[in-house]
Amino acid sequence: MKLSIASNQFPLFQPSGLDDVKDPCPVFDGRLWHMYGSGGTVTSETWQIYHATAPALEGPWTQAPLIDLPLAGSGVAAPGVVHDGDLFHMFIQTEFMKPGGTIEHLTSRDGFGWTRAATSLKAVPGTAEQGIYDPHPAQIGGQKYLAYSAMPDFQRVPQPDISLARSASGTWFGPWQRLGKILDHEDIPHHNPRHHPDYEWGSKVRNWWNWKAARCC
């Protein structure tokens, strides 16, 4: 996380003992700010979940121990976290840039220790959601949603678009109804298209979803 909103200072938060950090997700619990994200190294694509707390979004940030999640998968990373009532809810991928994978739901009372609640979504072989990752929760108009990257089978690099699911129960525990794709590559004029020789994989609009959710709530 680089940019301080109030003072434009760099860096906002610099975790120690990690070569690379990404996927920052700030959450306010009514008393403290929490920062979650992926920490590790791009060299081997090995990631853990970092955590820090601060009295204000601008800091100062205190690094907490890395979170050891009870999940299996080669790409456990990119946590999307919300605080609702007396619980933190984390949604996280188990695979990245690979077929298969799930989006898992975990809960926590204090934001430090986590318990697996359920599998929220599974990849669907042979469809546009053969691989799923990068989940992000949002509440819009009283409804609970999960936006996530979904990709079909690929030959060279993944080609994800953004899909959406809505909780049928109105809670973060689901079950989750898939609503389909909400944003296609072609909807983003500044993003190079699939046929471009310099096309690069990526969940290109995770920040777009965060911005949309923030404006709606």
Image: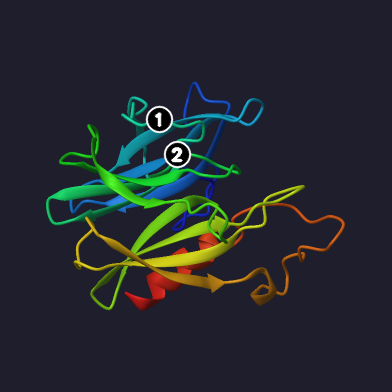
Q: Classify residue 171 as left or right of residue 197.
A: left
The quadrant of the image that shows the C terminus is bottom left
Residue under numbered circle 2: 94
Residue under numbered circle 1: 72
- Mark 1 surroundings: few (<14), some (14-19) or many (≥20) residues within 10 A: few
x%, y% of residue 172? 23, 58
x%, y% of residue 41? 59, 28
Tell me how far mark 1 sits from mark 2, CA to CA: 7 Å
Q: In terms of depth relative to the viewer, which is nearer, 148 or 29?
A: 148
Please tell me which residue is depicted at 46% across the width and 32% down the height of the picture.
73
145 lies above or below 203: below
Please tell me which residue is depicted at 23% across the width and 46% down the height of the picture.
32
Residue 82 - label: none
Mark 1 in CB contact with mark 2 (< 8 angstroms): yes
Q: Classify residue 35 as left or right of residue 182.
A: left
187 lies above or below 19: below
Q: Earlier in the sequence, mark 1 or mark 2?
A: 1
Q: In terms of depth relative to the viewer, which is nearer, 134 or 156?
A: 156
Please tell me which residue is depicted at 77% across the width and 47% down the height of the picture.
156
